[in-house]
Image: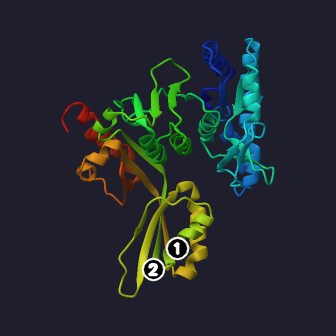
Amino acid sequence: MKFGGTSVGSIERIRNVAKIVEKKKDKGHDVIVAVSAMSGETDRLIGLLKEITPDYSLREYDQLVSTGETACIPLVTQSLLVDGYDAISLTGLQIGMETDIAHSKARILNIRGDRIKQAISEGKIVVVAGFQGYNVETGDITTLGRGGSDTTAVAIAAAVKADVCEIYTDVDGVYTADPRIVKNAKKLDTISHEEMLELASLGAKVLQSRSVELGMNYNVDIMVLSSLEDKPCTLVTSKEDKNMERIVVSGVTSDKNQAKITLLGVKDEPGVAVKIFIGLAEANINVDMIIQNVATEDGKTDISFTVPKTDLIKAKAACEKLGKDVGVQEILSDENISKVSIVGIGMKSHSGVAATMFKVLSDNQINIKMISTSEIKVSCIIEEKFTELAVRVLHSAFITEKQNGQL
């Protein structure tokens, strides 16, 4: 069971979390609970660090922000103890959550889990700090990136072969679009790991994409539930469901954390693209969409690509460093963009989905700057100011009208 920051945002809510956990224990289940920091605490700590310097050490960042979860787990555990339930709180280090050394976005290498298994065998409820681990070689604390408590929960579920991983949030499931943008968005009863992975990586905030990837790789069923009200949930699973393929588009999502970089006048010769993108990879920057223009007569070309907006300064610095080697004449950037995407496993067996998407955007005077596709998704880069409109019209075309039998 995993509880997010909103779910443990106050002592009253922590007591509510304890009651939910206790009901599960009363039904005879062995229970492991992963928790985030209290709502707003991580942002508060980062704000303090930025007051000292915006150019902070990522090692010290991890040392600082990991304390949010470390402070929360004893509060949840104490609430369980007060109610008469045997429980123990454990940090990422104490459960043997081994990671690489990529501070602020470390990847899990192994979970020893000896103390978890020992505590479970003694009948204890185990309350684990999400988001954090440690590197064996250096002994340093690491964190898994924002939303990393989801990843912690699914990784532990895989390690102990749990029946299910329940993710409790401030929403009651996965919707066909953000209900704050699309009022008639529908909650999904079931969605495949494959679709959920695309939605999560494309901007849906319900689950961290790495947690879904782990669930898919280790066949962990994930249930998304509300910790604030008792409502039906969404099951994320790899179990085959013939009904899934009948739905062409399962969800529409958007991501405003996008920035575009264009390198003008790059040499059009073998090895240039390799140098650019190896340089970005070495700077630990994830590149999403890439477009290379047709070369001009003087053997020059332009390359455009997108990166997370938070990595823009670092990405431009990496490109400037490579500039002479690859012949970059000018580096342009655009932060006023967003990515809108449609996702659905049914796209594999239906043609014309991309064409319909482009027509819907065109009919609403929304210009497409870049396009990316896979078997089950189509993504377009557009001007940021059109984001909400794009989500609404695409949801209307692919989901609302389909439900009404009009598409």
Q: Which is more toward the observer, 94 or 80?
A: 94
Q: How far from the left and from the top, in percent, is residue 90?
A: 76, 32
Label 2 SS: strand
Q: Residue at x 66, y 31 (%)?
A: 35
> Residue at the spot x=38%, y=43% of the render?
388
Residue furthest to the left in view is: 406
Q: What residue type is labelled 1?
A: Val
Q: Which amino acid type corresponds to the residue marked 2 in the rendered image?
A: Gly
Q: Is residue 179 visible?
A: no
Residue at 51% over, 18% down = 229
Q: In this view, does 31 lie to the left or right of 399?
A: right
Q: Name the residue under label 1.
A: 274
User: In the rendering, at what x and y percent does residue 57 appear?
Assistant: 74, 56
Instruction: Report the front residue among 206 and 241.
Output: 241
- Where residue 259 sits: x, y (%)? 49, 58
369 is higher (above) or lower (below) than 214:
below
Q: Residues within 10 Å of mark 2 (few under 14, many from 20)?
A: many
Q: Tell me, for residue 265, which label it has, or none.
A: 2
Q: Is residue 320 above or below residue 16?
A: below
Identify the residue at the far right of this view: 139
In the rendered image, is residue 14 in sight?
yes
* Distance in Å between CA atoms under marks 2 and 1: 16 Å
Tag 2 and tag 1, C-beta contact below 8 Å: no
Figure quadrant of the N terminus: top right
Residue furthest out toward the bottom: 298
Location of the C terminus by quadrant is top left
Label 1: element kind: helix
| Residue 262 percent location from the top left of the image | 46, 69
Colour style of the rendered protein structure: rainbow
Q: Which of marks 2 and 1 is in front?
A: 1
> Which residue is more in the foreground, 158 or 370?
158
Picture residue at 53% right of the left edge, 55% below the top: 308
